[in-house]
Image (cartoon, rainbow, N blue to C red):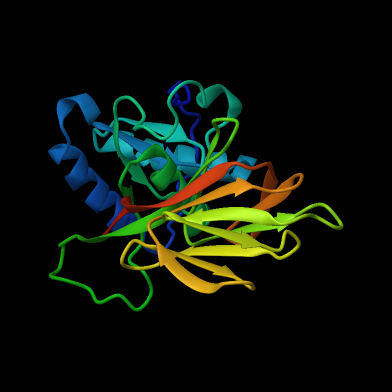
Amino acid sequence: MPHSTSPLDAVPARETPGVPRLLSAAVRLAGALPATRSTLGVVRGRHQSDRQRAGALRARLAERGVHSTELSPLPEPGERGGTYGLPVRGVGLLLHTPGVRPEQAMRAAALWRLPLLTERPEGAAGGEPGALGGRRSAVIGIHLADRGYELALHRVGLVSLRPDPGPARLILDNEKITMPGGRPLCVTVTGSGLLEVRGDSFGMRRVRRLRFERASGAHRLDLDGTPVREVRAPLRMAAEPGRLHLLYP
């Protein structure tokens, strides 16, 4: 759950492009949040410099009367217990801290099911001065056999770790497909909220859900191009439309 909100050490706030605009929008949004969710979550990285930036940002929010707490980009072991992926108690909005990579902040927002206030995407048209823009995006939710949960913003890969695996079986919506076990499986999410599944043996299919039902041995799970963990069948994936909610000034 949220980290301790112990008093902050004095950290000099550096002017980073976009920070004043984000702060101004955060203060406005904080005033519109319900009383039960009036805390802002500041996304912080794992390094000391990241903690200093998060502390400086929180100090500036406090100067404006806004209560905040820190959240890690990925839930840490003590934060995972019980139901995972529900909003953090008392927090109504996440704020992207300068220094944290955008994809880390977006992943945190999707995992915690909270809107993220971040810089306007490059190339996105601006609105009226002072007006907020926003969009919702689909992500890929992966429900694992050990009841764990992982999430990908854009794509998932499954690669067998056995040198000579047997065939694997998939269920695409209700269609059963057998595919060579040694071939990687790639799953992406479309703008319309469907899974786009690609395999050498069956080409490309667009489905609502996928079940990786039976396979020989362990596979490597890659999320957005990064190897994450070993997994075993069965596991299932589904597009989760609107789970990633971005706001930008």
Where the N terminus falls, by quadrant? top left
Residue shown at 80%/55% (left/top)?
A: 165
User: Looking at the image, is 21 positioned above or below residue 108?
Assistant: below
Residue shown at 48%/33% (left/top)?
A: 10
Place residue 59 in its image quadrant.
top left
- Residue 67: x and y in percent read 30, 30
Relative to 45, 94 lies left or right: left
Place residue 189 in its image quadrant.
bottom left
User: Looking at the image, is 115 positioned above or below residue 187?
Assistant: above
- Pick out the residue farthest to the right: 163
Of residues 87 and 15, the one nearer the viewer is 87
- Residue 227: x and y in percent read 69, 53
User: Looking at the image, is 188 positioned above or below residue 229?
Assistant: below
Relative to 244, 179 lies left or right: right
Where the C terminus falls, by quadrant? bottom left
Of residues 68 and 199, the one nearer the viewer is 199
> Total marks drawn?
0
- Residue 219: x and y in percent read 72, 49
Place residue 166 in its image quadrant.
bottom right
